[in-house]
Image (cartoon, helix red, strand yellow):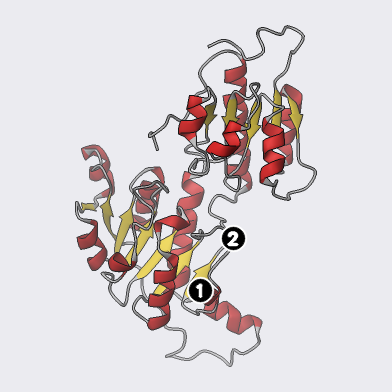
Amino acid sequence: MTAPYATNPSRTRLKVAVTRKLPETVETRMSELFDVVLREDDRRMSREEISVAMRDCDVLVPTVTDMIDANMLAQAGERLKLIANYGAGVDHIDVHSARQRGILVTNTPGVVTEDTADMALALILAVTRRLPEGMAEMQAGRWSGWSPTSHLGGRVGGRRLGILGMGRIGQAVARRANAFGMQIHYHNRRRLRPEIEAELQPTYWESLDQMVSRMDILSINAPHTPSTFHLMNARRLKLMKPSAVIVNTSRGEVIDENALTRMLRAGEIAGAGLDVFEHGHEINPRLRELPNVVLLPHMGSATVEGRAEMGEKVIINIKTFADGHRPPDQVLPNSF
């Protein structure tokens, strides 16, 4: 592969269009290296705005909030040769259509592993120990003093934690859960290598149904793909014990949100901790009303360090591409 501007010696820097406002350090470095078009505010770009940007840039830097589908790619200019996604997930990008048009796609894998695992454990503790209920009582000034029977949650030590999706993040969750004395179980499309199982000491379940029915806590750590859409559907959710808790820090589409809401309202599942939602920021209003649910605004990767590292990976991918080499984090169709 040759540099995309090699046939035009007068063009010395790639033109890069960014769809969202990024950390200042990332924007500064991009400006030093590329002819970059940055966002003045953090407003989401419309489809039309993104389409216009795609017609006049060499590289597009989108985020998870930007849907880059086949129709949009069909309107892209001949100049666009790289979509350098700011984030690990690429289910919002039609990678196959991009490939057909000769557009490479890259992402930022591995950066948010530890941060997201931290958030999964935080949600497990928040739900099982009823932290939001206690906070709400304190903030409203309703607390009248300690009582032996008030705010009783559950001990996490000794509980069975089922991890659905045992990739980087799932394994990081397992390491943290081991420190809390939890029993680790997992379901994955492929069993872990023996040396990883020796380290984490998990129990592997080939049958997701059987695992789900026996767990005290279920942590969702699977990507959104056609095969994982509503993987936790109404039938599978009904297999969970009424005392069980479900936590999701991966993709909202993996869970049937309406079915989950119904079961939480009916007491058929004890609680849920959700950092992602099936319809983005449009959350089922009935879900917001439930006291046994902890809802967060997609904060799993929201650390200063993590967002800066994501930006560094984006820059490395663009710079490597500009130098005529294959970007280190290139995503291939059907590879995620």
The residue under label 1 is: 287
Instruction: Report which quarter residue 7 is drawn in.
Output: top right
Residue at image x 66%, y 44%?
Answer: 47
Q: Is residue 209 left or right of residue 181?
A: left
Q: Is residue 145 left or right of residue 227?
A: right
The residue under label 2 is: 281
Residue at image x 41%, y 47%?
Answer: 223
Instruction: Report which quarter residue 124 is drawn in.
Output: bottom left
Q: Is residue 96 left or right of residue 73?
A: left
Expressed as whole percent of the image width and height from the top left, the position of residue 175 reads: 36, 51
Expressed as whole percent of the image width and height from the top left, the position of residue 258 reads: 44, 69
In the rendered image of this protein, does residue 33 appear above or below residue 221? above
- Label 2 environment density (alpha carbons within 10 Å; few <14, some 14–19, many ≥20): few
Residue at image x 20%, y 62%?
Answer: 210
Check disc 2 and report its element: helix, strand or loop: loop
- Among numbered discs 1 and 2, the one appearing first in the sequence: 2
Question: Nearest the camera: 309 or 329?
Answer: 329
Visible in this render: residue 26?
Answer: no
In the rendered image of this protein, does residue 260 appear above or below residue 175? below
Instruction: Report which quarter residue 76 is drawn in.
Output: top right
Q: CA distance from mark 1 to mark 2?
A: 13 Å
Q: Please name the amino acid that badge 1 sits on.
A: Leu
Question: Nearest the camera: 7 or 212?
Answer: 7
Cβ atoms under marks 1 and 2 closer than 8 Å:
no
Q: Is residue 158 left or right of residue 290?
A: left
Expressed as whole percent of the image width and height from the top left, the position of residue 148 reads: 43, 90
Expressed as whole percent of the image width and height from the top left, the position of residue 16 reads: 70, 28
- Label 1 environment density (alpha carbons within 10 Å; few <14, some 14–19, many ≥20): many
Q: Please name the amino acid that badge 2 sits on.
A: His
